[in-house]
Image: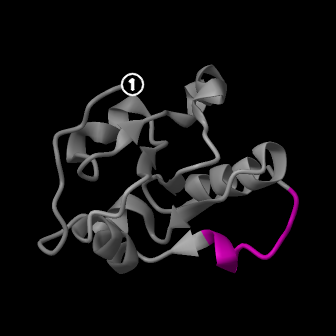
Amino acid sequence: MFDETDTDSLEISPHDVWQLISDGTSELVLVDVREDYELTRGMLPGAIHRPLSRFGQYQQDWRTDVRYIIYCEHGVRSLDVALWLLQEKHIKSESMQGGFAEWAGPVHPVKAGERA
């Protein structure tokens, strides 16, 4: 979907995301790009929902003064979004490695899914 580049610098571990949330890092925005039907398992606390199928509707939402952590179910679509934001919008964002599947479990909290 996007040009090849060094994607390692665009990824962040679920553990590091949890640290940022726990530390109360200001100007951090968590973005869930999963589709509506995928939200039944929940979302990361404080995340906003911007489904990839309707992603174009949210083009004006992106700011340059915040840190975006993008996630999907397994980390593939979110990596595409992070790369697109960097290449097309010049916005630094990171994809959570392993996505929600890696996050969900007894260690990290989950909130009820809220559709965009």
Mark 1 surroundings within 10 Å by alpha-carbon count, few (fewer than 14), some (14 through 19), many (20 or more): few
Along the viewing direction, whichever of 75 and 90 lies nearer the viewer = 90
Left or right of 79? Residue 24 is: left
Specify the farthest residue to the top. Answer: 57
Looking at the picture, does residue 51 appear above or below residue 93? above
Image x and y of residue 33, in percent: 49, 42
- What residue type is disc 1 on? Ala
Task: Identify the colour scheme used.
Answer: one colour
Tell me what residue is drawn at x 67 percent, y 77 percent.
9
Image x and y of residue 104, in percent: 24, 64
Tell me what residue is drawn at x 18 percent, y 54 percent.
110
Image x and y of residue 100, in percent: 36, 59
Left or right of 66? Residue 22 is: left
Q: Quadrant of the image for the C terminus? A: top left
Numbered range of the magenta stretch: 3-10
Mark 1 lies on residue: 116
